[in-house]
Image (cartoon, rainbow, N blue to C red):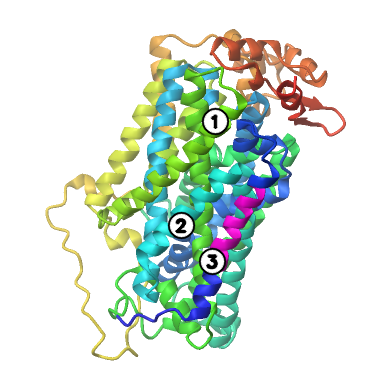
Amino acid sequence: MEVKNFAVWDYVVFAALFIISSGIGVFYAIKERKKATSREFLVGGRQMSFGPVALSLTASFMSAVTVLGTPADVYRFGASFVLFFITYGLVIILTSELFLPVFYRSGITSTYEYLQLRFNKPVRYAATVIYIVQTILYTGVVVYAPALALNQVTGFDLWGSVFATGIVCTFYCTLGGLKAVVWTDAFQMVVMIVGFLTVLIQGSTYAGGLHNVLEQAENGSRLNIFDFDVDPLRRHTFWTISVGGTFTWLGIYGVNQSTIQRCISCKTEKHAKLALYFNLLGLWIILLCAVFSGLTMYAHFKDCDPWTSGIISAPDQLMPYFVMELFSTMPGLPGLFVACAFSGTLSTVAASINALATVTFEDFVKSCFPRLSDKLSTWISKGLCLLFGVICTSTAVAASLMGGVIQAALSIHGMCGGPMLGLFSLGILFPFVNWKGALAGLLTGILLSFWVAIGAFIYPAPASKTWPLPLSTDQCGLSNVTESVPPVLSSRPAIAETWYALSYLHYSTVGCLGCIAAGVIISFLTGLQKGKDIPPLLIRPVCNLFCFWSKKYKTLCWCGVQHDSGTEQENLENGSTWKQGAESILQNGLKQESLVPGYDPKDKSYDNMAFEKITHF
């Protein structure tokens, strides 16, 4: 493959991204140096507004894997990926109305604190360890995979970009904490959108206009979006994306530490919800940009596919190769696209490092050493950011030795996210589930989701289920074309045609539902949790939606939880802390600073002023 090297201006544009990102970290390190508390460092003092948090949320989960992978997926399989438009909407509504109120009003910093309040320490620690391992591995791959694709197409130095990413992220996370991460993410989000729009404008112009792009995509069967086949083995249908995709992204958004940490950093619950809903607009914009980039790329390569013709060696190299062809006479613009891709990487890695530092400090350090001073707590938090930055960069080095295992590692986010979603759902939605059921459910969900995912990796689904669309090499030079040999599917066990052929979007579905089912069954077998012992703040009474016509049935579904006692609301409206929740927190060994936020009747929202009063008491 001919590698098209970067020009000087490409390196200048790309370097500017790293310099500005580092500069934001230095700025907040200097600005906030007098507010040297772990709370200020890890959750921005809980006084962030919704705007930058919304941009940060979008940037954090739109990694370089999205920038490079989504257009390539649309190029190969068609524009059905746009159905994630529905998925994102469902996920944000459920997160903001179901999970966020519980986490925000509980006054927690780590989402896994909730598990100790609701169940006990073993459940909390088990979930925390799974999250840490999953996030480190995923982050390493997010760093390495795009660097490899860009290196093989653009000649951009592989290890230089890997270490630069790790060093810069670690630098501004360690110096500036969450505020630096949020504002850097906001800047990187803008870079991502500008990069996508540049590709779309130049690509559609080159193809003869957007109308021509859509016409070529229609002729190539790329616009057959709505497929209502209910077969869960099919890779992308309306149902696998809207149902399986919702479970997958709810595991990432609804109960993920990185998301919730940003939401609880907002000054009021209303701001937190606004951040999620404005973030939804960002998700939709990035999704549409990525889908149209894939269609534009197809219009460009419709007669000579660079992958099947052997010009490039992997589908994730399609987008960089397309950009290098598109901007071959425009120095600086390839650098802008690489900056766009690495903006996704930087934001994801920074969010992961900050979240890892937070859960480790809150769930392990603080539990073991509850009387740390503010100054020492801040230095420990910064040390954890530095440690996890080194570990994540080292994992990227290890990822280079994995070969094909990289694809399996990318699925781990979904494989662990499903059981974790199931665990939090057991706590928030099922008051009668006890800690034994929760722990057994988590392990069951992990085993089920890993079983199906590893089986699918060993025995890939047949083409009849994935349905890749035809690609043409008619206009390619004969010397470039390589014969594609279909994979041999002999000696496959019967389970490979059913269970292992399940759509990858249902890994989270399997893990979540398996966790919930096992948790409920084990709780019935070992003795149900008494509802009167559970603080109402920790339960979301969704049964009220279905039993609104009968107070008797509502009360029955509460399983003994005192939702109608009035204690919680009265105390919160008076700006005081809820005694029962405080006692529960103190019994579990946490500080009094973890008390619930106050209720502001004017704003009709919960705010974090209670934290400020307690912190400065």
Q: Which residue is rendered at x = 60% and y = 45% of the image? A: 176
- One can see residue 283 in this view: no
Going from the N terminus, do you reach mark 1 or mark 2 first?
1
Q: How many marks?
A: 3
Residue in the foreground of this view, choosing between 453 and 602: 602
Instruction: Residue under label 1, please give it.
Output: 111
Amino acid, disc 3: Cys
Residue occupied by mark 3: 340
The x and y percentages for residue 581 are 65, 15
Query: Does 599 sit left or right of 518 as displayed?
Result: right
Task: Look at the image and give the residue range highlighted in magenta.
Answer: 16-28
Residue sticking out furthest to the left: 491
Q: Quadrant of residue 587?
A: top right
Residue 252 covered by magenta stretch: no
Q: Residues within 10 Å of mark 1 (few under 14, many from 20)?
A: many
* Viewer-nearest of discs 1 and 3: 3
Residue 209 lies in what quarter of the image? bottom right
Q: Residues within 10 Å of mark 2 (few under 14, many from 20)?
A: many
Identify the secondary structure beneath mark 1. helix
Whether 248 is drawn above or below 567: the answer is below
Q: Is residue 359 depicted above or below 489 in this figure?
A: above
Estimate the x, y position of residue 381 in percent, counting from the top left. Answer: 53, 34
In x, y percent, where is residue 434? 46, 15
Marks 1 & 3, CB-CB < 8 Å contact: no
Q: Which residue is mark 2?
A: 165
**Dot 1 amino acid type:** Thr
Image location (x, y in percent) of residue 532: 60, 8
Disc number for residue 363:
none
In this rendering, the label closer to the viewer, 2 or 3 = 2
Comparing 617 with 423, the one in front is 617
Q: Nearer the viewer, mark 1 or mark 2?
A: 2
Q: CA distance from mark 1 to mark 2?
A: 27 Å
